[in-house]
Image: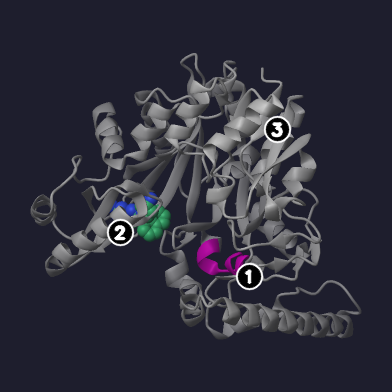
Amino acid sequence: MFQKILIANRGEIAVRVIRACRELSIETVAIYSDVDRDALHVRFADEAYFIGPPPARDSYLLMDRVIDLAKRSGAEAIHPGYGFLAENGDFADLCEKEGIGFIGPNGDVMRSMGDKVMARQTMEKAGVPIVPGTTHVLSDSEAIAFSKQIGLPVMVKASAGGGGKGMRLVRDEGDLEQSIARARSEAMSSFGNDSIYVEKFVEQPRHIEIQILADSHGNTIHLFERECSIQRRHQKLIEEAPGNGITPELRERMGKAAVTAAQAVGYVGAGTCEFLVDQHDDFYFLEMNTRIQVEHAITEAITGIDIVKAMIRVAAGDPLGIDQQDVKITGHAIEARIYAEDPDNGFVPSPGEIIVYRPPGGIGIRVDSGVHHGATVTVHYDPMVAKLIAWGCDRTESIDRLKRALSEFVVKGIKTSIPFHQMVMRHPVFLEGKYDTGFIDDHMDGGKGGDELQAQDDQEVRRVAFMLAAIAAYQRDKKRASTARAKTGGGGVDPWTDFARRAQMRGNLR
Ligand code: MV4
């Protein structure tokens, strides 16, 4: 086993990895940029080293510097977390070349999944169902001909893409040429590679993903599914496990498909196979994420398996030590991602100092957070400030606990998605559990307006907007506190009554 690990990340995931290391008696090394000197992950680690200025490309993404710090601190392995260098095959190669363990699959495996056309070919050969479409990179004329052949609507996707980037839906034949050109140029500017392929469009799909774990001794297991359809612009907001209405038979077929997918590329570590599930419960492989994911905690909650510890162990060469039959689902878990964003205003970022931070607790509640009282949320990194995970014996209990915890959660100084989650937890369609990837557009007004402010990136205008928002928040909080006292003599009042009432007027709630 490793004695010392460097965590090449920040925020809640760095804290999560440090906690796993501590339980395994492994020493931890944090790295931090200028704005993260005071961050929680730095306070939690045994040692911490400065990496560079705030922009990630000048700090957390500097491969040579990360490796140099690992060597100088005596860390034998690097955990990349998610984002940053986590799915960079060249970084994994570099670690190997420099004699440092990379906690994740090797570079070849990452590249084979990172190239979506290659991944589709591999899955087709292995017998994993893929969305009907091409398994070769196409010229413009081939893409047009093929689209007409399988019939519209189609999705034109970038081979180097993933997570929704470089993707275009085409419903009319007349739009094919232009959409292909746009997808290509987007792919070129985002990934430096303009290869595209075409898939049949799956209408109103659900996004269901399977967590897998694999060791270097040939053991691969799955930890069941997560339902991740509640997303806005390819940013997940709520996830739950197990999925709603997933029969034991479908669960087993999808689990087996994910294990087959992992084995087909010689996967070692923790990984996730994303599938689209259509209205007939047919499922199609979309892509494989070769990293720990934000939403891993709901799987931990229903299986009792510490996924981060497992990935450290298998990277050190240990066997998994559990078989598929040992893994059972207990209860239900839901995660609400708390972002520093204003959900009432098109989810515009809401950076600033967190002047009050009081996370919830109690039975069934887990909060994974990278912030603390007095921390500042900057514009340099992902705006997710906390993950709130509620476990219950069944779905109803996990929803009740999440609602209760959301009402306890106090974050002041910035706006957060807490009121949005409060609304979803009361929405009849969510409560019924019959939703798909259209949920936010169809039932939550797409996340509500704010497009003017979103298009505005003038620093000064933003600064003024934040100041006005802070003043408004202060006055609102004062008013709320006094009405709460007047109504109830203190306590017991849902702090989001105003938000819920406005939502009700829009007809979002019963
Ligand atoms: C699709 C699709 C429908 N048909 N592909 C979006 C993210 C990327 N991983 C793939 N995505 C989609 N691919 C075909 N052939 C619909 C989506 C999609 C989606 C997928 C998962 C979760 C949310 C989504 C929201 C819009 C579109």
Task: Give the Cα separation between the discs numbered 1 and 3.
Answer: 30 Å
Element marked by disc 2? helix
Q: What x and y, as percent, mark residue 314?
A: 57, 21
Q: Is residue 424 magenta?
A: yes
Q: Which residues are magenta?
A: 419-430
Q: Residue at x 71, y 42 (%)?
A: 15
Using the image as rendered, state which of residue 28 and residue 270 is in the foreground: 28
**2 or 1: tag closer to the N-terminus:** 2
495 vs 33, left or right, is: right
Q: Which residue is mark 3?
A: 20
| Quarter of the image where the N terminus is located | top right
Q: What x and y, as percent, mark residue 253?
A: 38, 34
How are the colours assigned in the image? one colour
Task: Give the Cα separation between the discs numbered 2 and 3.
Answer: 39 Å
Using the image as rendered, state which of residue 332 and residue 160 is in the foreground: 160
Task: Give the Cα separation between the discs numbered 2 and 1.
Answer: 28 Å
Q: Nearer the viewer, mark 1 or mark 3?
A: 1
Q: Which residue is mark 1?
A: 350
Q: Nearer the viewer, mark 2 or mark 1?
A: 2
Q: Residues within 10 Å of mark 3 (few under 14, many from 20)?
A: some
Q: Nearer the viewer, mark 2 or mark 3?
A: 2
Query: Which quarter is ligand 1 in?
Result: bottom left
Q: What x and y, as percent, mark residue 499?
A: 65, 79
Q: Is residue 486 above or below residue 77?
A: below
Q: Residues within 10 Å of mark 2 (few under 14, many from 20)?
A: many
Q: Residues within 10 Å of mark 1 (few under 14, many from 20)?
A: many
Identify residue type, mark 2: Glu
Tell me: is circle 3 under 8 Å from ligand 1. no
Element marked by disc 1? loop
